[in-house]
Image (spheres, grey):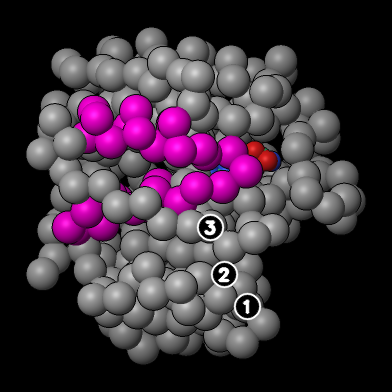
Amino acid sequence: MTNDASFRFTHAITRRPAASITHGLRAVDTGTPDLATMEAHHAAYIATLRATGATVIELPALDAYPDSVFVEDTALCLPQGAIIMRPGAPTRLGEAAEMAPHLRALYTTIARIEGPGTIEGGDILVTGREILVGQSARTDAAGIAELRAIVTAWGHSLREVHTPPGVLHFKTDCSLLDGDTILSTERLSASGCFDGYKLIHTAPGEEAAANTIRFNDVVLMPAGFPGTRARIEAAGYNVAEIGNSECAKLDGGMSCLSLRFTPS
Ligand code: CIR
């Protein structure tokens, strides 16, 4: 079964990286991101989304929020409406309110996670048949319960899964290639959370390639993972490689850089 609504979009929202990105959150310090390089990668990312025919909104940089380039964590966009998230990282909480007016301008229906629970978009994978949400250091049971109440009323089924220990977000380790095909690390799929889906695994030693996005007819993946690229292409997908060296220093990847949706 495939559900095209899970990977066909008319719109994306991005936000330019701020100079303060050098202070962005990171689990391990592997060096300070270089703003000019990140901007070049970001421009290539946007150009690739636009080349599919979509409208891509570029919001201005928000210097007060070093991680604000990672817009995915601020909202969940579904065909029925958009839901403003409640990020679990205290330095990122205000990013959700910054995103809200932009979604209000495009969507008729907007909901919001009120708290006290927390939930970030990086922990949510919308497939062609359900919404998977991984508990993580950023997303807790109360946040998931609030989201469940909203999306169930909109006709979705939500299944709670677990993010592997030491992994920032659920989607750090997986992504959707089409309505029922998932790209995943072996360490994540070993939990059985994707049983019943078609699975493509990242190549050995290429776990950092798991976070891709299927956007219309292209799969955007981080540059430098030839084994995984070959597996995705062998399955018939059209791949575009985007430099991700600077975002990777902050545990960010392809999905984090946009909200993807068709307004309703
Ligand atoms: C953070 O720790 O929140 C950022 N440095 C990275 C966020 C990545 N977002 C995502 O995976 N959705």
Q: State the separation of the CA atoms marked 1 and 3.
A: 18 Å
Magenta highlight range = 124-151
Q: State the separation of the CA atoms marked 2 and 1.
A: 6 Å
* Amino acid type, residue under disc 1 in the picture: Glu
Q: Is residue 127 magenta?
A: yes
Q: Give the residue drawn at x 44%, y 31%.
A: 142
Residue on which the image places disc 3: 163
Mark 1 or 3, nearer chain start: 3
Q: Is residue 163 magenta?
A: no
* Amino acid type, residue under disc 2 in the picture: Ala
Mark 2 residue element: helix
Ligand 1 quadrant in view: top right
Q: Nearer the viewer, residue 79 or 17?
A: 79
The answer to whether any part of residue 159 appears in the image is yes
Crowd rating for badge 2 (residues with CA inside 10 Å; few <14, some 14–19, many 20+) = many
Q: Nearer the viewer, residue 169 or 20?
A: 169
Q: Are circles 2 and 1 on residues that touch, CB within 8 Å? A: yes
Q: Give the residue drawn at x 14%, y 30%.
A: 153
Q: Which quadrant of the view contains residue 146?
A: top left
Q: In the visual, does 177 lie left or right of 142?
A: left
Q: Give the residue drawn at x 64%, y 18%.
A: 62
Instruction: State which mark lies toward you, 3 or 2.
Output: 3
Where in the figure is residue 45, as x and y percent of width and height? Answer: 51, 49
Residue on which the image places disc 2: 209
Q: Indicate yes or no: mark 1 CB to ligand 1 under 8 Å.
A: no
Image height of 219 relative to 88, above or below: below
Residue on which the image places disc 1: 206
